[in-house]
Image (cartoon, rainbow, N blue to C red):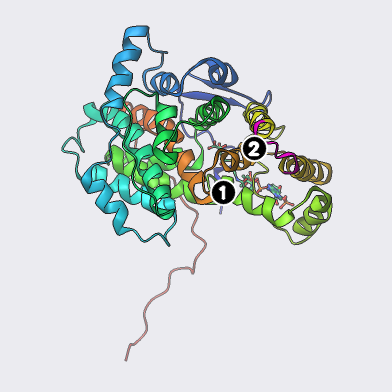
């Protein structure tokens, strides 16, 4: 076997992209050239979506037209609602979302029209929150809440989920989290979307595949799994002992480590600051003490730092979301990055098809068969 195998494609540069730049040396992240902490401080989530899709922030008139297009598509269609209702509540909300996007694609006459991809992306950005909000509500035995076209994306998403717009600290922390989750170069789910697109398949198929890839606990599923860690550890005083045992048992501590960042995830300081503001509002100091104690124990023992999922998990908990809804929230943000990459891949396509080194039995032949 003479080929060099890069298991997990570690360190492999698969293509160019102009969507975002991750610099592991400086732990920094740029969307279309703009530092993400700056976008999180000064932009709406809709503006960031526009930036990822069009390469520039919208001018005032472009912003009004773009927001209007999104606001008009926020209501859950009867077909999608019926599809959600068909999925048992025992199924994970990511399965519901995957099914709903599939139904959206099957009902879109533009499905194979590449020129309509930007419009389909706007539709998904509006419909995905409606699905997530309705799914959480039906699991709680609550009625669907109709969208409010007078509200911005973030406020409307929260209104459809909770039946009211929460206070500004919650609204702002949610906005920050979605901007931070929006895009991250060739991560597993985005790469999945690019692979599917490279075959000539439509945008919805690529997004359905990406949702499947994001569900796993080594990727987006970690924000949900972080809550299980916090609950299992229980109190700050138990953190050191718990981390020692988890490492001895060779368990992966969810919310820590990253394939690209080895000196810390660029997004964590911004999300941690939002979490701190939520804690200040709710007075939940024990949660913060627990969070800090687990991080201190992990860093002291392994040098492995938190990734974005570590502060996002408890932040979504304090905002009032059910734990199983956390990874769908990641989808609501990342659909912007996925679709930007889908359009980039389609515009300059080459089928993605690597080679494999065969390690099975050498050639052999069937003997007489009875
Ligand atoms: C937004 C996101 O999707 S970020 C990722 C979210 N995922 C998680 O939080 C899940 C937990 N983390 C992990 O599983 C990993 O850190 C990954 C999958 C994210 C990245 O891992 P990789 O780049 O493949 O590194 P790999 O898994 O080989 O880890 C290297 C070493 O660090 C250890 N390590 C890495 N992360 C962790 C962790 N969270 N807990 C314990 N040990 C860890 C590995 O066990 C391995 O040790 P070894 O060399 O002794 O075998
Ligand atoms: O980049 C990755 O491998 C995972 C990640 O942090 C993300 O998708 O946001």
Sequence-first tag of 2 and 1: 1
Q: Kindly identify which residue carries mark 2.
A: 311
**Residue 229 at x, y percent in the picture:** 67, 52
Q: Kindly identify which residue carries mark 1.
A: 224
**Which quarter of the rendered picture does the N terminus lie within?**
bottom right
Q: Is the residue marked 1 within 8 Å of ligand 1, measured from its CB? A: no
Q: Residue furthest top?
A: 60
The residue shown at (58%, 45%) is 223
Lateral position of residue 169 relative to residue 231, left or right: left
Foreground residue among 352 and 238: 238
User: Disc 2 versus disc 1: distance between alpha carbons?
Assistant: 11 Å
Q: Which residues are magenta?
A: 281-286
Q: Is residue 183 above or below residue 253?
A: above
Lateral position of residue 267 relative to residue 209, left or right: right
The residue shown at (63%, 32%) is 278
**Residue 347 at x, y percent in the picture:** 31, 26
Mark 2: few/some/many CA within 10 Å (<14, 14-19, 20+):
many
Tell me the SS state at disc 1: helix
Foreground residue among 63 and 305: 63
């Amino acid at each position: 076997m003479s080929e060099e195998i890069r298991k997990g494609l570690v360190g492999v540069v698969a293509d160019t992209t102009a969507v975002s730049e991750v610099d592991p040396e400086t732990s920094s992240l740029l969307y279309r050239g703009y530092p993400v902490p700056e976008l999180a401080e000064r932009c709406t989530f809709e503006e960031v979506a526009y930036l990822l899709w069009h390469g520039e922030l919208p001018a005032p008139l472009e912003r009004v037209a773009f927001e209007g297009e999104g606001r008009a598509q926020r209501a859950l269609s009867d077909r999608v609602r019926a599809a959600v209702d068909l999925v048992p509540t025992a199924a994970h909300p990511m399965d519901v979302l995957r099914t709903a996007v599939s139904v959206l694609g099957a009902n879109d006459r533009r499905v194979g029209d590449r020129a309509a991809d930007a419009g389909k992306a706007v539709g998904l950005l509006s419909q995905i929150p409606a699905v997530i909000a309705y799914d959480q509500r039906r699991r709680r035995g609550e009625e669907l809440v109709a969208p409010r076209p007078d509200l911005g994306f973030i406020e409307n998403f929260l209104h459809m989920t909770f039946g009211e717009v929460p206070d500004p600290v919650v609204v702002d922390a949610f906005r920050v989290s979605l901007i931070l989750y929006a895009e991250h170069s060739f991560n597993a789910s985005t790469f999945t979307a690019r692979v599917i697109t490279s075959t000539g398949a439509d945008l919805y198929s690529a997004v359905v595949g990406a949702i499947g890839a994001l569900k796993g606990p080594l990727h987006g599923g970690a924000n949900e799994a972080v809550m299980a860690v916090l609950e299992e550890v229980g109190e700050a005083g138990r953190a050191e002992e718990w981390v020692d045992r988890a490492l001895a048992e060779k368990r992966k501590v969810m919310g820590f480590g990253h394939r690209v960042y080895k000196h810390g995830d660029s997004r964590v300081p911004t999300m941690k600051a939002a979490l701190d503001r939520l804690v200040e509002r709710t007075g939940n100091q024990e949660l913060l003490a627990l969070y800090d104690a687990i991080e201190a124990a992990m860093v002291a023992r392994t040098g492995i730092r938190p990734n974005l999922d570590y502060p996002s998990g408890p932040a979504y908990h304090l905002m009032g979301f059910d734990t199983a809804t956390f990874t769908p929230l990641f989808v609501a943000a990342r659909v912007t990055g996925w679709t930007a990459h889908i359009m980039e891949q389609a515009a300059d396509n080459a089928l993605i098809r690597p080679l494999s080194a065969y390690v099975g039995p050498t050639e052999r032949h069937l003997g007489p068969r009875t």
